Every structure is written in structure tokens, then in C-alpha cells.
């Protein structure tokens, strides 16, 4: 569908430069089939949402079944079993202390909810804490609030007048000195007072370029926050549901946040749903006969029963199937294939955590950097591979069902694509 024949305005798409949209007609496993009969391998899990595989049977079955008895039901004055059962299951597997589950429908929204909970928590107690600390290069969504908390740049420059300010900590790493600098600057901010919450993506800054940092740093940030009465919000929208090798990334640091956000893989990626989990303390600060202390947030589709049923089915997949073994095996398969890039000077910072493999393309004359991304993407497209570099960062984040042969196609494609594009620029 071209910009001339379709009224659709696509996200993160420059219609003046993009080739025609391919029309997806069917999905299965790690593959998107288009209307021209092409089978395109999904190397980014359709923007990081699909975990087990496209149209994963138990999840699709749960959606079908739930739709036989319920559609959207107002979630004030009513509850329903899919929401109740999913909430109980989430509390059962979440880090200690997260006993309350607030539903919404996207990653951005569940982070907005988290920020509102944090500020409401202090406001309702008459405590003047309203500053928010974040990590540089963070990404939390594209709404005004989450853009405010995320890295500023070309993506949000026009909206700058609408964005509120937050405290930015330098990225923690890779050197121990840089890690210490992050911790020191956080400690200093906490000492200044008025700090309400620290909002971070644990272990991996996704959209910020698949930048990894150590679990020990996360643990230290958590310790400092606790010592100063600052709430900790983990945005596990991308990292959740096995992406980093454990169900939640924060498990690797052995720390529990006060507020946890999860979305993308919550339903295995089949259907939109998000939750913000909070501690009993945060719930209690909103519990009052004074109606002004109500948590004033809702979206029309809060706790959609069909989506909740999909979420519950995802949790059953985690309980009944060897998901952890699949993730571990996928990680090893990535490692074997990343090996050949280590001696290749065109690539740097070759890294993997869980099911995410990434490497930086060393691009001579970085001025062209902006152009290498689209050129690589075009090459991958010609090979029926869905791979979208983040600037000069090449990464793979496939559904867990990807086969070894499919992985080979990705890695061969990356090697050939880079050779092809570098040659083009050398001309
Ligand atoms: C994708 C993402 C979001 C936003 O989720 P949407 O569903 O796109 O609104 C928030 N935080 C992180 C870490 C993400 O990767």
C-alpha cells in the first residue's frame, strides 16, 4: 500500500522515503506472510511484543474462548474472572511485595500510571516529593509524560514545550568509574531532597540502543533509593517475559521495585494489555474516605477481558511449557553465531543478554551514520528479513520459537548486508 492509495498514517514512518507497505495476511511462528506470498522472518518480534511465537496456539485459543462470553466491561463497579485470575497469577510470580495490580493497555500508559502512582503516593501523605530521576538514553514510550522521562532528541524536539523536566543520571558503564559516577550522581540528587521516584529500564536500555548495564548497578541504585525513601519504578515493558533470560530482568539483581510496569510480552504479544503493579504501601496511601485521594486514572479499555484471558494463557504457557529452557537454548544459539563477528573489525561491542543479541556497526565517517540504517533495512527487506537497526546498532530480538536455520538466515543476512552497504558507501 503506498502513501497515494492508502489513508493510513504509519508509526515512526517517513512516508516520503519509505517503500510501499507490505500487506501482512498471516502470521505463524517467527514468520509474517505478506499478500505477495513472501515469508518474512520477524527478527524483532514485531517491535518486541511477540515472545513465544506469532499466533501461539494456547494464547489464540484463550482469546477465542474468552470472546464467547465477554467483551469490554466497564472496570469500575465491575470485575471479571480473567482480570482477577491474571492479577492473582501476576502477584504470585512478581517480586516480593508487589501485591496490587492496575490494568491499562499499553507500555506508555502503564509507565504514566506508575509516575502518577508515585506522585500521588507522596501527595496524599502531604509529603513534598515530586522529582523524578531517570537514566540517560532511557525510553519509556511516546506519550507526553513518557517522552518527558525518556531521552530527548530528534524524536521529541517539536514537543519540547510540553515536556516536564526530570533528573538524568549518566548511563552506568561500561567502566567501573562510569558505574560509580551514575551511583554518585543519584546519591547526590537524593541528598538534595524532594526526590519521589527513580524510573529505569532494568539491565537493558532498549530503544536507547540496546545498551546493557550490570545487575550490580541496578541493585546499588535500588539500595540508594531505599536509603533515601525514594520509590523505585522498573519499566519492564520490553525486558519482561524472558527477554533478558529471566522472566523479569530485575530477578537478576535480586531486588523488588515499589512499582513494576509490564506490557509487550504480557499476552505473548498477541493483544494489547499492560499492568502496573504496586506495593501495599502505595495502594494504602490512596485508600481513604477522602475521595480526593482516589487514584484518578482509567482508560476505556482497562482490563479488557479478552486481553486478560490472553495474559493468563501466557502465564500458563510459562507454567506448563519449558519456556526457560527455550530461552536458554536461544541464548546459546546466539552466542555461537555472534562468535564469528568478534574478530570482524566492522563490528564492535558484540553483546547478548537472554534472547537479545546486539552489536555496533563501526562506520567510517560517522556523518553518513544516519544513512546506513535505512540502507541496511532495505537490504534486509530484499532478503525477507525484518531487522531494523537502531542507528548503527544492529540487534536481533526474535520470538523464542525461532529455529537454528532461521537464526542462520538472520546472521548471514547481517554479514552480507553490512558488506553490501559499506561497499556502497565506499564508492
Ligand atoms: C515499548 C516500550 C514502552 C512503550 O510501550 P508502548 O506499548 O509502545 O506504549 C515503554 N517502555 C519501554 C522500556 C519500552 O520498550
Image (cartoon, grey):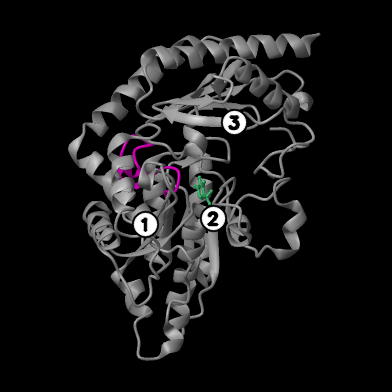
Determine whether 12 is above or below 104 in the image.
above
Give the number of the disc on residue 223.
1
Question: Along the polypeptide, which appears first: circle 3 or circle 1?
Answer: 3
Instruction: For mark 3, give the secondary structure.
Output: loop
Give the mark toward the camera: 3 or 1. Answer: 3
- Closer-to-camera residue (359/275): 275
Seen from this angle, which residue lies furthest bottom?
Answer: 290
Dominant secondary-structure state across the stretch colored magenta: loop
Numbered range of the magenta stretch: 236-255
Give the number of the disc on residue 23.
3
- At 37% from the left edge and 43% from the top edge, which residue is drawn? 216
Residue 292 at what x, y percent from top left?
Answer: 46, 87
Determine whether 105 is above or below 402 in the image.
below
Q: Quadrant of the C terminus?
A: top right
Residue 244 at what x, y percent from top left?
Answer: 38, 36
- At 49% from the left edge and 66% from the top edge, which residue is drawn? 299
Residue 2 at what x, y percent from top left?
Answer: 73, 33
Give the number of the disc on residue 134.
2
Q: Crowding near pointer 3: few (<14 within 10 Å), some, many (20+)? A: few
Residue 259 in view of the camera? no
Q: Crowding near pointer 1: few (<14 within 10 Å), some, many (20+)? A: some
Q: CA distance from mark 3 to mark 1?
A: 49 Å
Amino acid at each position: 500500500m503506498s502513501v497515494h492509495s492508502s489513508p493510513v498514517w504509519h508509526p515512526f514512518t517517513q512516508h516520503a522515503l519509505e517503500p510501499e507497505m507490505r500487506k501482512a495476511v498471516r502470521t505463524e511462528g517467527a514468520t509474517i506472510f505478506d499478500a505477495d506470498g513472501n515469508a518474512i522472518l520477524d527478527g524483532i518480534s514485531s517491535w518486541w511484543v511477540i515472545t513465544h511465537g506469532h499466533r501461539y496456539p494456547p494464547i489464540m485459543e484463550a482469546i477465542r474462548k474468552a470472546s464467547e462470553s465477554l467483551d469490554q466491561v466497564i472496570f469500575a463497579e465491575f470485575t471479571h474472572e480473567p482480570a482477577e485470575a491474571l492479577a492473582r497469577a501476576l502477584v504470585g510470580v512478581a517480586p516480593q511485595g508487589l501485591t496490587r495490580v492496575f490494568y491499562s493497555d499499553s507500555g506508555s500508559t502503564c509507565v504514566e500510571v506508575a509516575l502518577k502512582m508515585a506522585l500521588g503516593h507522596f501527595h496524599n501523605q502531604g509529603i513534598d516529593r515530586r522529582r523524578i530521576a531517570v537514566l540517560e538514553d532511557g525510553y519509556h514510550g511516546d506519550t507526553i509524560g513518557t517522552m518527558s522521562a525518556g531521552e530527548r532528541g530528534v524524536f521529541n524536539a517539536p514537543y519540547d514545550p510540553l515536556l516536564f523536566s526530570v533528573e538524568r543520571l549518566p548511563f552506568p558503564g561500561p567502566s567501573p568509574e562510569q558505574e560509580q559516577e551514575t551511583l554518585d550522581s543519584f546519591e547526590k540528587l537524593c541528598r538534595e531532597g524532594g526526590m519521589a521516584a527513580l524510573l529505569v529500564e532494568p539491565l537493558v536500555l532498549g530503544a536507547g540502543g540496546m545498551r546493557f548495564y550490570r545487575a550490580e548497578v541496578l541493585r546499588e541504585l535500588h539500595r540508594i533509593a531505599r536509603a533515601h525513601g525514594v520509590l523505585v519504578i522498573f519499566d519492564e515493558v520490553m525486558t519482561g517475559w524472558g527477554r533478558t533470560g529471566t522472566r523479569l530482568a530485575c530477578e537478576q539483581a535480586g531486588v523488588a521495585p515499589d512499582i513494576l510496569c509490564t506490557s509487550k510480552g504480557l499476552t505473548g504479544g498477541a493483544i494489547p494489555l499492560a499492568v502496573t503493579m504496586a506495593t501495599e504501601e502505595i495502594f494504602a496511601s490512596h485508600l481513604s474516605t477522602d475521595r480526593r485521594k482516589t487514584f484518578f486514572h482509567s482508560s476505556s479499555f482497562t482490563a479488557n477481558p479478552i486481553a486478560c484471558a490472553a495474559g493468563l494463557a501466557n502465564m500458563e504457557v510459562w507454567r506448563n511449557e519449558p519456556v526457560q529452557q527455550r530461552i536458554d537454548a536461544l541464548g546459546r544459539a546466539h552466542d555461537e553465531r555472534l562468535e564469528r563477528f568478534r574478530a570482524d573489525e566492522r563490528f564492535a561491542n558484540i553483546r547478548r543478554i537472554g534472547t537479545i543479541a546486539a552489536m555496533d556497526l563501526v562506520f567510517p565517517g560517522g556523518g553518513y551514520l544516519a544513512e546506513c540504517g535505512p540502507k541496511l533495512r532495505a537490504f534486509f527487506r530484499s532478503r525477507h528479513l525484518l531487522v531494523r537497526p537502531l542507528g548503527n546498532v544492529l540487534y536481533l530480538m526474535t520470538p523464542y520459537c525461532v529455529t537454528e536455520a532461521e537464526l542462520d538466515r538472520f546472521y548471514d543476512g547481517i554479514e552480507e548486508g553490512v558488506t553490501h552497504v559499506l561497499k556502497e558507501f565506499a564508492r
